Structures are given as C-alpha cells and as structure tokens.
Image: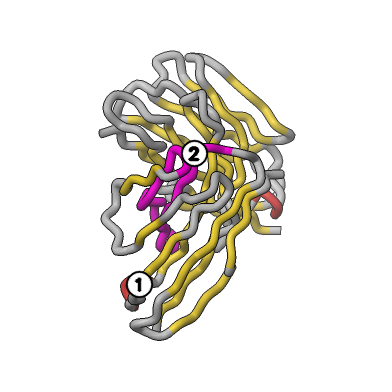
Amino acid sequence: EADIYQTPRYLVIGTGKKITLECSQTMGHDKMYWYQQDPGMELHLIHYSYGVNSTEKGDLSSESTVSRIRTEHFPLTLESARPSHTSQYLCASQKAGGTYNEQFFGPGTRLTVL
Amino acid sequence: SQELEQSPQSLIVQEGKNLTINCTSSKTLYGLYWYKQKYGEGLIFLMMLQKGGEEKSHEKITAKLDEKKQQSSLHITASQPSHAGIYLCGAPPSGSARQLTFGSGTQLTVLP
C-alpha cells in the first residue's frame, strides 16, 4: 500500500477564501504531481515537481500555486477560491531514476467552492 | 502529443461475466499502466506493460499489450462487485512529453 496522504479529504468553502491542500509521502520519492479531475472526466496535470525547490506547471492551466520545500511535502494553494475551482484534486509521487516507475496516488481532496 | 482512447466509456455487467476494456494510443507506447479508481478516491496501480505482446495477470485481471504496442486490453474474468470502479490506462512520457498521459477512463458497474 502506498504511503501518500492528502488532507483534507473533503472541503466545502466560500468564494474568496484562501485554501491549502496538503500532500505528503513517506517513500522518499523525488517526483510529485498534482492532478485535477472533474467527475467522470480525465485527469489533468496541473503541477509537478522533480525535487526540492523545483516546481513546474502542468498541461492544464491552473490558478493554484505549489511549493516544494521538503521532499515529502507538496502543498497546493488557492489564494482566492472560486466556484470554478470545484473539483477533485489528486496528488501522486514517483520514484526518480526510471521513466517507467509507477506513480502512487493519494486518496484525493474533493473541493467544493460555494 | 500522445492521446489515449478507452472503450467502452462505461460498462454494466452481471456478476460472474467476463469483460474487456480497451486502450488505444495514437502513438507507439513505450509502456502502459492500468489503474483502478473508486469514485471520489485516488488511483490504485494495477499493473504495467512494456514489451510488445506482454501479458500480465493479477488475480482475475489480465492485461495485454499488442505486438505493435499501440493497444492494450484489460480483461476481467468472472467479474465481482468488488471490480466495480473506473479503470484508467496511462502512458509514460515519450518524445517531448514529460508526464504521464491518461485515458478518459472506463466506468465499470457489476450487478450482483
């Protein structure tokens, strides 16, 4: 079983609030990812990191930001949440050193912005 | 960019029936992952295929990658309600792409 955690699992907040979605992994993986997934839809990569102090934007444009100060921690922040941010956010990690190493996924955070 | 198309989009079967889910790539695959996702949760890694013609099995789930490495199939034998969920295929990066590409998923419902 993968050791990757996301909190909170569910979050309902009002428009304009600042929120941070937490993601932690205990596997020592260098690579970490954030995906956004609407119900019944594809996963879209919004951010990734190949190591500490390294972050990049993914394929899907997102108003969120990320940081990678520690290997095990990859939080995602929305400065001012809007209803259009309502979605499921999935965090994943991957061992470096091999293109084909599988990604391990956290349980996800389901965000609803009212 | 590489695209993965899954079929069918959704599938409803009676418990005990066999079923197959397909994943077709627009480009040659250098590897192919299969994941399962329960609604509203994260993805669980099932298996990975790399070589043309490769076949792997885990319990009642068998995945194959065709010789040309452009199509993969996931076959479930004697389906059970516990098999229900969304099955996603994913391809590792190739060419200029740096990240995994995922298919849109197949929603499987198994009726008891």
The relative height of residue A64 versus residue B24 in the rendered view (above or below) is below
Q: Main secondary structure of the magenta part?
A: strand
Q: Give whichever of A82, B4 is nearer the camera.
A: A82
Label 1 CA crowd tier, 10 Å (few <14, some 14–19, many 20+): some
The residue sitting at 38% across, 50% down in the picture is: A47
**Distance from label 2 to label 1 (Cα)?**
24 Å
**What chain does badge 2 belong to?**
A
**Residue B43 in the image: x percent, y percent?**
56, 49
Under tag 1, what secondary structure?
loop
As drawn, the label of residue A93 is none
Q: In which quarter of the image is residue A40?
A: bottom left
**Residue B82 in the image: x percent, y percent?**
70, 52
Under tag 2, what secondary structure?
strand
Q: Where are the magenta residues, as a range?
A: A29-52
**Residue B34 in the image: x percent, y percent?**
54, 37
The residue sitting at 60% across, 32% down in the picture is: B47
Magenta span includes A87: no
The residue sitting at 47% across, 68% down in the picture is: A20
Q: Is residue B37 visible?
A: no
The residue sitting at 41% across, 85% down in the picture is: A14
Whether marks 2 and 1 lie on the same chain: yes
Label 2 CA crowd tier, 10 Å (few <14, some 14–19, many 20+): many
Along the horizontal axis of the image, is A109 left or right of B16?
A: left
Instruction: Identify the residue position indicated by label 1 in the image.
Output: A79
Q: Which quarter of the rendering shows the N terminus of chain B?
A: top left
Q: Give whichever of B102, A62 is nearer the camera.
A: A62
